[in-house]
Image (spheres, grey):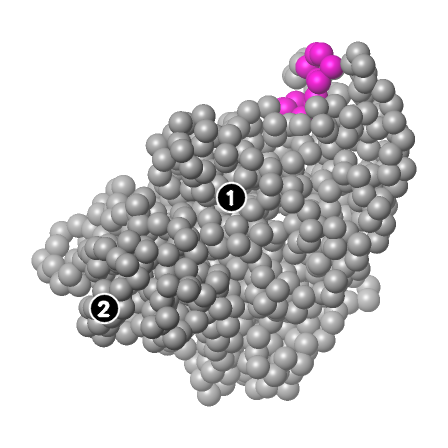
Amino acid sequence: MSNYVINHLKELESEAIFVIREIAAQFENPVLLFSGGKDSILLTHLAKKAFFPAKIPFPLIHIDTGHNFPETIAFRDELVEKLGVKLIVGSVQEAIDKGRAKEETGADASRNSLQIVSLLDTLEDSKVDAAMGGARRDEEKARAKERFFSHRDEFGQWDPKNQRPELWNLFNGRKNYGEHFRVFPISNWTEMDVWEYIKLENIDLPSLYFSHQRDCVVRDGVILANSDFIKLKEGEEVVNMTIRYRTCGDMPITGAVKSEADTLEKIIEEIATTRTTERGGRADDKRAETAMEDRKKQGYF
Amino acid sequence: MEYQDIELLRFTTAGSVDDGKSTLIGRLLYDSKSIFQDQLDAVEKSSKSKGFDYVDLSLLTDGLKSEREQGITIDVAYRYFATPKRKFIIADTPGHIQYTRNMVTGASTANLAIILIDARKGMLEQTHRHAFIASLLNIPHAIVCVNKMDLVDYSEKVYDNIVSDFNAFSSKLGINDIQFIPISALNGDNVVNRSNNMDWYQGSTLMYHLETVHISSDHNLIDCRFPIQSVIRPHTLNNQDYRGFAGRIDGGVFKPGDKVKSLPSGFVSTIKTIELNGEQISEAFAPMSVTMTLEDEIDNSRGDMIVRENNVPEIGQDLEVLVTWMSTKPIQARTKVVIKHTTNETIGMVKELKYKIDINTLHRIENIDKIEMNDIARLSIRTAKPVFFDAYKRNRQTGSLIIIDEQTNETIGAGMII
């Protein structure tokens, strides 16, 4: 290291930590949106590093759709306990019970869009002015245009054509009353960067990400976990398969991949040779070409 | 696979619809296997539905609905690819004059600029513009790709003329490192693989340049600058007296034991530790994020700066600045604004508008009464409290600032301190 260069993972880490510290400094009530997926676990790890030896100075918010993998919830509770950080849970079931959100019907029903209502309600209840998330620009084409500091109006909406320019490392988090920001500290990371960093830092992940046996249903080419949340269509059958997950959303919409990769080394090798994007298995993105952009404009993260 | 100990290179491309920029990016992504099958399938599907005969790779980068409808890039799009030698971030920006602000945004974080010239057309106004922005933003390296060589019969003479035209223009600009490469993005000549059609060209391919250009001295390693983002005070029984200064190093090399000075207080102390997550760091330099502790209890807070005792930045309230105007709302002299510089924020007043620069001819336009969107102009600013700065040419982090509208909170200007 005598020639004063840091490698790409250290540079990405350094950038993310800078952004996380900016959030803590520029906002009064920041939170970290914790989905239980690897990206938000990585973000939590970076937040811990940013403020050590102090504790993470903001709470985690988890939007519980009621359709989560049980592994995700167990992992979440353990992590929160270990870090000594506050957890706020927003419940989609509660929003449905209160009549704030309406459940979709049919075999492909999903609670993915319903999260938006619970998320915006929870942010408002907690008077949140900055919600940071683990979204990355390489994930999806609408996210490729997202800023680090993404301004939302008082209705939580994203206006992609009227975004603040972002220059050097000067982040403008000034806002008017009632508006808030979504902030994405790991914007510049790719899926490969995330996995290499997880390996480098030895970060714990839920078992879902590693190869395991599971009862599955194959629907429109997507491998879905069989659960109480999924209704079998005619001709569909439950098959026991060796799979793992590349992303981690709700049980009824997150597609698995057939995989024998049961260690981080094998996962990195698998990603290096894979020919599809990680959201390729997400039924929620397949509804329309601009499904992600449309949801983001409404307040999805 | 081993953990890859490779560097990150950020580069920017500027170009308009027909100069082959999207084709070039598409080829870099495709030949480095960074386009996934499902992305390619989606692009093929929408190319077909639009009635195109070929796969339009620009649909990969143009992500917003309105961009896809209009077939243009509106915003800065960030793209990622990697080879076994390096990781790359492309800031892909539109090249027309009405998008100057987007080009400036993309250029602000780049180590390298790719400037595309159509071999059939030679130097155009937009080439001047792209070269000027690269020099204005002090991008350390530039690669001029003379594209569409296939359409001029791979002529050495055509290429040589363009190179000498470009050199004649750029000698006025002061870009330190310029490389020229004759390419055909469409056919792949000299992009990733060497061309068989241009034996007269002895230089390397574009990809080879991107993988090997020396970027370790792109950061200032001489002038020690550490702007404080926040103060870490754990308030726990084990760490009752811990007081760490969190921030990202903007210049120089800091080591434990170094004598340092804190601005604006002027107090002098010694670095006790430099650490991150409890791990000790023996040498810290840009762009590392660290936590620093000092031997003496000094009352530093956000916006303060730790520097070396015998190498301090300029300290003052009067700034001479070149700005790119970002807002549809013009600005006039005597307007009150908010200035963000390093981790410091202050009220400021635009005192005087000096001149605009004609971005195509580099001529100065004097006696101006306002600055409008996409203008590049020189103005003077008076700040309410002192800022600690270096000239932008010396340090891109401590020499840059953004101007914010006091009412709307929008970012309205990007400034480089002279």
Give the residue number, with chain letter if any, for mark 1: A144
Residue occupying image coordinates x 84% and y 25%: A226
Q: Can residue B238 be seen in this view?
A: yes
Residue neighbourhood size for the residue with mark 1, other residues' Cα within 10 Å, grouped as few (<14), some (14–19), many (≥20):
many
Image position, residue B310 (x, y; %): 46, 88
Image position, residue A225 (x, y; %): 82, 29
Magenta stretch contains residue B36: no
Label 2, secondary structure: give it: helix
Q: Mark 1 and mark 2, same subunit?
A: no
Question: Looking at the image, how many numbered discs can be counted on the residues?
Answer: 2
Magenta stretch contains residue A107: yes
> Where is A174 relative to B175, above or below?
above
Q: Which chain carries label 2?
A: B
Q: Is residue A171 left or right of residue A241?
A: left
Q: Mark 1 lies on which chain?
A: A
* Disc 1/disc 2 C-alpha distance (Å): 40 Å
Q: Is residue B277 left or right of residue B388?
A: right
> Where is A91 relative to B350, above or below?
above
Residue occupying image coordinates x 66% and y 69%: B5
| Residue type, mark 2 in image | Lys
Q: Quadrant of residue B185?
A: bottom left
Q: Give me the disc on residue B157.
A: 2
| Residue type, mark 1 in image | Ala
Q: Nearer the viewer, residue A299 or A97?
A: A299
Quarter of the image containing the C terminus of chain A?
top right
Q: Tell me which segment is drawn in magenta.
A: A104-117
Quarter of the image containing the N terminus of chain A?
bottom right
Label 1, secondary structure: give it: helix
